[in-house]
Amino acid sequence: MDTALAKAWVAAAADAVSAEAEHLSRLDAAIGDGDHGTNMDRGLTGARTAVDGLEADGPGPVLVKTGMTMISRVGGASGPLYGTLLRTAGKRLEGTEAGVADLAAALRAGLEAVQKMGAAKPGDKTLVDALYPAVEALEKAAGQGTPLSEAAEAAAAAAEQGAQATVPLQARKGRASYLGERSIGHEDPGAASSALLMRALAGVSGA
Ligand code: ADP
Ligand code: MG
Ligand code: MG
């Protein structure tokens, strides 16, 4: 992944989230306050503009800028969480180009920072349920020497499965946890948006 691919990822993620904003907010209306789609749309649309004119000599600064924009533009839980994910991952990416192993390590560091911030483990019905298996898929692909296109495809599929698997879970973190057992039977909106982000990566990586 070079600078151009990182910018393309941010743009594709912004497009995907814009297209699905209503759906994401509807998921959030069922178990939260109904703003997840507008939150993510505002954050990523801002990030796309911010990185568009950014002069960066590698993917790292692009992800850092995206994360900072999410933190500053999104007031909800998802802004600081996605912001921390991308800022931490971006700081890990040095040099003009990142391979699958670099990206896996960077996103693992980002995920760990997210888990530290929000104290969510897999199974708590949060965006961690989509990101965790996606990072594991990237790590596995890196170990096998798989090219980015296939690695990103595997990560997207794992994130989508992880998001779907939140449906029968009871939320233990975030706003949805206030509902207790009534959170069961709905897909977590943050897990759904994480799956969109990983699918966007697969799209621009040319699977
Ligand atoms: P808010 O809940 O403040 O309105 P959003 O609706 O934008 O924020 O985001 C909600 C999503 O944030 C949830 O669906 C969940 O995936 C994620 N989330 C909330 N709290 C946590 C947490 N402590 N750890 C990880 N993810 C969380
Ligand atoms: Mg919300
Ligand atoms: Mg909110």
Image: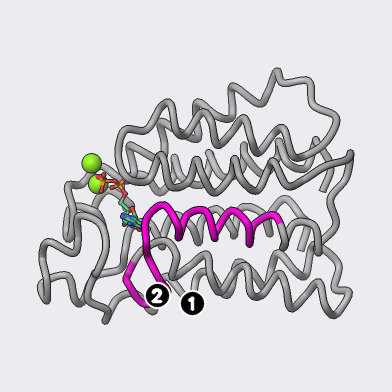
Q: Which residue is found at the position 38% from the left and 79% from the top?
A: 165
Question: Looking at the picture, does residue 157 appear above or below residue 1?
Answer: below
Question: Looking at the picture, does residue 84 appear above or below residue 148?
Answer: above
The answer for how far apart the CA atoms under marks 2 and 1 are is: 5 Å
Question: Looking at the picture, does residue 151 appear above or below residue 98?
Answer: below
Q: Amino acid at mark 1?
A: Gln
Residue carrying label 2: 164
- In the picture, the disc for residue 161 is 1
- Image position of 31 (left or right of 40): left
- Image position of 14 (left or right of 178): right
Question: Looking at the picture, does residue 86 appear above or below residue 115?
Answer: above
| Percent coordinates x, y for residue 3 in the rendering | 80, 36
Question: Which secondary structure lies at badge 1?
Answer: helix
**Residue at the limit of the structure toward the front, as seen here:** 116
Magenta span covers which residues? 106-125
Residue closest to the eye, 119 or 83? 119
Question: Which secondary structure lies at badge 2?
Answer: helix
Q: Amino acid at mark 2?
A: Gln
Rate crowding at label 1 as few (under 14), some (14 to 19) or many (20 or more) other CA atoms within 10 Å. some
| Percent coordinates x, y for residue 68 in the rendering | 53, 30
| Percent coordinates x, y for residue 95 in the rendering | 88, 40
Q: Which residue is found at the position 68% from the left and 42% from the top?
A: 90
Q: Which residue is found at the position 79% from the left and 26% from the top?
A: 56
- Asked if disc 2 and disc 1 are in contact, CB closer than 8 Å, the reply is yes
- Image position of 171 (left or right of 86): left
